[in-house]
Amino acid sequence: RLLRVDPGRAFGTGTHETTRLCLAALESSAAAGPLGRVLDVGTGTGILAVAARLLGAAQVAAVDNAPEAVASARLHARLNGVGFGVVLGDGGQPFRARAFDLVLANIQAPVLLAKRDELLSLCAPGGRLVLSGLLRDDLTAIRAAYGDAGTLSVRSDGEWVAVLVEAPGTPVR
């Protein structure tokens, strides 16, 4: 599918390796079964949220702490003819625990490490968490922090990586 993008000032035009890694994780998740409820944390332009809707997610929410990113995500939803909720907020704080089947977090490693418990708490039983914005050098710390949360698998593109965390339990859809 083709995504319409107006690059503007927000992060996430689809050309960066970390965004491509997240898009690939979304596509493979959608190929494996329904995406269910999806949250895009640190949405930037909202490209991942748009892609989740286009790939059939039942519900999509997006959050960013930058007002220009929230405006950009809303613009991209309109440009691509999809709807999803966009919230100005910090990480997963605006959302209730265990509310999402898939959480996307394409943000820098220090934030992923600091918000570990918050991000994991958003996943429903059997849910998945995609962590990106990571360099290969970040992988050891991410594995140490998230290793006990479920099964980890790694995708790479050059010096960049994404980690898929599959939580134990039966998905609720």
Image (cartoon, rainbow, N blue to C red):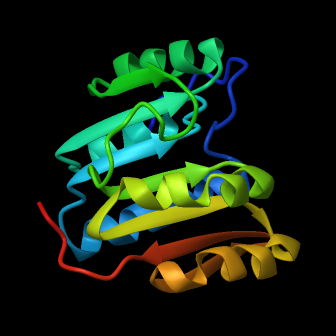
Residue 86 lies in quadrant: top left
The vertical placement of 63 against 72, above or below, is below
Q: Is residue 170 left or right of residue 153?
A: left
Q: Image quadrant for the C terminus?
A: bottom left
Going by the picture, which residue comes out furthest to the left?
173
Q: Residue at x 73, y 19 (%)?
A: 9
Mark count: 0
- Where residue 164 appears, as percent x and y from the top left, is 51, 73
Q: Nearer the viewer, residue 9 or 90?
A: 90
Q: Residue at x 79, y 54 (%)?
A: 110
Q: Residue at x 64, y 36 (%)?
A: 13
The vertical placement of 53 against 84, above or below, is below
- Where residue 132 appears, as percent x and y from the top left, is 65, 60
- Where residue 94 appears, as percent x and y from the top left, is 42, 30
Q: Is residue 52 left or right of residue 4?
A: left
- Where residue 50 appears, as percent x and y from the top left, is 39, 37
Q: Residue at x 48, y 41 (%)?
A: 92
Residue 51 lies in quadrant: top left
Q: Is residue 78 left or right of residue 136?
A: left
Going by the picture, which residue comes out furthest to the right?
137
Residue 2 in view of the camera: no
Residue 14 in view of the camera: yes
Q: Nearer the viewer, residue 169 or 40?
A: 169
The vertical placement of 64 against 31, above or below, is above
Residue 123 lies in quadrant: bottom left
